[in-house]
Image: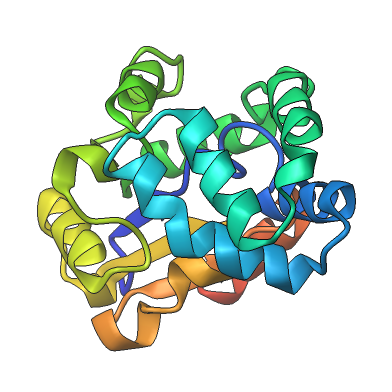
């Protein structure tokens, strides 16, 4: 078996909609390009996911850099009133099947400790061997240290790991570290990508 472990991002893969949906809507609200929004958002993402600063300060910093401070009330309203996110049940079923096939499974999420508690209390947690969030380990995707730590905890080599994420930026370190990355856009495409790697469900 070439691949022994499969890792998942939490938000946008197992839980909620893929990240690009949010970033496109936010860029439209702020009247900036999608690329410009992503560049600034990911530049400061560690403030939320490692340093755990208050959401209000985070968004003020983003909007200041985008020169859109006047959009703060609309942005906070949008963030606070997005549709309630839920588990992607198709992905949960996929995880159950992969577990039965003997793969080691885990979540590596750019998230805070509060998020880690939520993941560990979810119904999918019992199928996962490892759950790691950036605030706990001090590294965040795409840092190579985050993926190396994840592989170590799964007790596999990076070359034996497939990692599924909904954000391209989070998996740009795949060649450097050695893990195989899959960009998640929808369930049907994910099954096709896994099948291409010899993993049939």
Which of the image's four quarters has the N terminus? bottom left
Identify the residue at image location x=65%, y=50%.
63
Image coordinates of residue 21 in percent, x first then y, are 78, 49
- Front residue of this view, candidates 42 and 177: 42
- Front residue of this view, candidates 10 and 67: 67
- Front residue of this view, candidates 26 and 108: 26
Image coordinates of residue 121 in percent, x first then y, are 36, 12
From what the image shows, is residue 46 above or below residue 133? below
Task: Determine whether, in the image, residue 110 is placed left or right of residue 153.
Answer: right
Task: Determine whether, in the image, residue 40 is placed left or right of residue 9.
Answer: right
Image coordinates of residue 106 in percent, x first then y, are 32, 43
| Quarter where residue 15 is shown | top right
- Front residue of this view, candidates 61 and 88: 61
Task: Determine whether, in the image, residue 108 is placed left or right of residue 193.
Answer: left
Identify the residue at image location x=11%, y=58%.
152
Image coordinates of residue 175 in percent, x first then y, are 36, 87
Task: Determine whether, in the image, residue 159 is placed left or right of residue 84.
Answer: left
From what the image shows, is residue 113 above or below residue 68? above
């Amino acid at each position: 078996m070439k691949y022994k472990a499969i890792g998942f991002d939490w938000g946008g893969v197992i839980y909620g909609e893929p990240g690009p949906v949010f970033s496109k809507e936010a860029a439209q609200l702020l009247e900036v390009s999608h690329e410009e929004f992503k560049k600034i958002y990911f530049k400061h993402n560690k403030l939320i996911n490692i340093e755990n600063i208050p959401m209000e300060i985070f968004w003020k910093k983003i909007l200041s850099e985008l020169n859109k401070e006047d959009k703060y009330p609309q942005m906070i309203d949008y963030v606070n009133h997005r549709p309630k996110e839920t588990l992607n049940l198709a992905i949960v079923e996929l995880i159950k099947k992969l577990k039965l096939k003997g793969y080691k499974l885990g979540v590596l999420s750019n998230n805070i400790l509060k998020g880690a508690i939520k993941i560990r209390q979810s119904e999918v947690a019992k199928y996962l061997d490892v759950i790691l969030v950036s605030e706990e380990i001090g590294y965040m995707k795409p840092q190579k240290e985050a993926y190396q730590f994840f592989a170590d905890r799964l007790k596999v080599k990076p070359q034996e790991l497939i990692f599924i994420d909904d954000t391209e930026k989070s998996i740009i370190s795949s060649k450097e570290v050695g893990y195989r990355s899959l960009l998640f856009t929808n369930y049907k495409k994910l099954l096709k990508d896994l099948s291409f790697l010899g993993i049939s469900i």
